[in-house]
Image (spheres, rainbow, N blue to C red):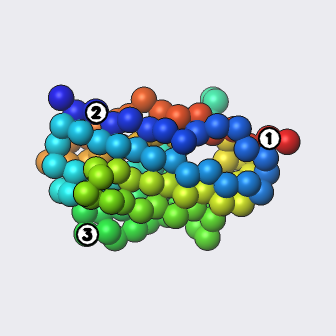
Amino acid sequence: QVQLVESGGGLVQPGGSLTLSCTASGFTFSSAAMNWYRQAPGKERDLVARISKTSSIYYANSVKGRFTISRVNAKNTVYLQMNSLKPEDTATYYCKASVDFTNYWGQGTQVTVSS
């Protein structure tokens, strides 16, 4: 059974930092492309960052230079380090694994950036 469990969300002031984690089970993590998406209320779910199985990385323009995605295959975990957070980063953040032409989603973790 595939599981993706996100953690690390919370309330942070503008300019602050958070690190999200997504720990996976039920599939071969090292073979998966791992993605972070976010969805704000009333908006579509958008891709934030992606790291391939070979560690090729993509960032959305809105987070370039502020967010860093990384993975530790030995821990079946992907991370999203978020710095210089802005109110517009407020959203539910979701982890997605893409492996063997199948996508799996986590349940999401809330990030709120507010003073």
Nearest to N terminus: mark 2 or mark 1: 2
Mark seen at residue 54: 3
Label 3 CA crowd tier, 10 Å (few <14, some 14–19, many 20+): few
Instruction: Give the amino acid type for the residue marked by disc 1 in the picture.
Output: Ser
Mark 1 surroundings: few (<14), some (14-19) or many (≥20) residues within 10 A: some
- The structure residue drawn at horizontal position 41% and vertical position 62%, both measured from the top left corner, is 70
**CA neighbours of label 2 inside 10 A, class few (<14), some (14 to 19), many (20+):** some
Give 26 or 103, whichever is nearer the viewer. 26
Q: What's the residue at 77%, 57% (across, down)?
A: 15
Q: Which residue is mark 2?
A: 3
At label 2, the amino acid type is: Gln
115 relative position to 48: left or right = right
User: At numbered mark 3, what does the secondary structure look like: helix, strand or loop?
Assistant: loop
Q: Are marks 2 and 1 in contact (CB under 8 Å)?
A: no
C-alpha gap between disc 2 and disc 1: 30 Å
Q: Earlier in the sequence, mark 2 or mark 3?
A: 2
Q: Whole-percent x and y of residue 31? A: 18, 56
Badge 2 marks a residue whose secondary structure is strand
Q: Total number of numbered labels?
A: 3
Q: Amino acid at mark 3?
A: Thr
Residue at image position (33%, 59%) is 72
C-alpha span from label 1 to label 3: 36 Å
Q: Position of residue 40 (x, y in %)?
A: 62, 36
Q: Which residue is mark 1?
A: 114
Q: Which quarter of the figure has residue 61?
A: bottom right
| Residue 62, visible in the rendered structure | no
Residue at (59% x, 34% y) in the render:
110
Q: Give residue 5's position: percent from left, percent from top.
A: 38, 35
